[in-house]
Amino acid sequence: MITRVKRWGNSLGLIVPAAVARSQNIRDGDYLEVEIRRRVPTPSELSGTWKFRRSLPELIREMKEGWDDL
């Protein structure tokens, strides 16, 4: 499981998603062993997914039409 560290008062905490807790039968008060490895996010994870209003072919067609007006 990969999770993000979050500030919790003066400390740092990890959140275990509910689906993972259910599948692993993790309950409040349980002890877990954590292996710490720093992971560098990929550029796509940092920027997210781009969503455009128009498809690429529509944008290209519009650009070509714009050149005709010059």
Image (cartoon, rainbow, N blue to C red):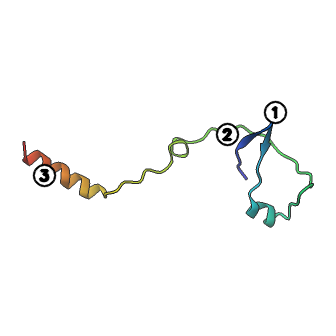
Q: Position of residue 55 (x, y in %)?
A: 31, 58
In the image, what residue occupies the spot 43% across and 50% down?
50
- Residue 39 falls left or right of residue 18: left
Task: Tell me which numbered mark, 2 or 1, is placed earlier along the sequence.
Answer: 1
The disc placed on residue 24 is: none
Picture mark count: 3
Task: Select label 1 or label 3 by which is in front.
Answer: 1
Q: Nearer the viewer, residue 53 or 24?
A: 53
Mark 2 lies on residue = 39
Q: Determine whether the residue tagged by mark 1 lies in a helix, strand or loop.
A: loop
Give the Cα separation between the discs numbered 1 and 3: 58 Å
Q: Position of residue 15 (x, y in %)?
A: 76, 50
Image quadrant holding the C terminus, namely top left
Q: For the residue marked with disc 3, what is the amino acid? A: Glu
Q: For the residue marked with disc 2, what is the amino acid? A: Arg
Mark 3 lies on residue = 65
In the image, what residue occupies the spot 11% across and 45% down?
67
Q: Determine whether the residue tagged by mark 3 lies in a helix, strand or loop.
A: helix
Q: For the residue marked with disc 1, what is the amino acid? A: Asn
| Mark 1 neighbour density, 10 Å: few (under 14) some (14–19) many (20 or more) | few
Q: Nearer the viewer, residue 24 or 28?
A: 28
Dot 2 and dot 3 residues touching (CB under 8 Å): no
Q: Position of residue 48 (x, y in %)?
A: 51, 48
Mark 1 lies on residue = 10
Task: Tell me which numbered mark, 1 or 3, is placed earlier along the sequence.
Answer: 1
Q: Nearer the viewer, residue 7 or 42?
A: 7
Task: Select label 2 or label 3 by which is in front.
Answer: 3
Q: Nearer the viewer, residue 23 or 18?
A: 18
Give the Cα separation between the discs numbered 2 and 1: 23 Å
Q: Determine whether the residue tagged by mark 2 lies in a helix, strand or loop.
A: loop
Give the Cα separation between the discs numbered 2 and 3: 46 Å
Dot 1 and dot 3 residues touching (CB under 8 Å): no
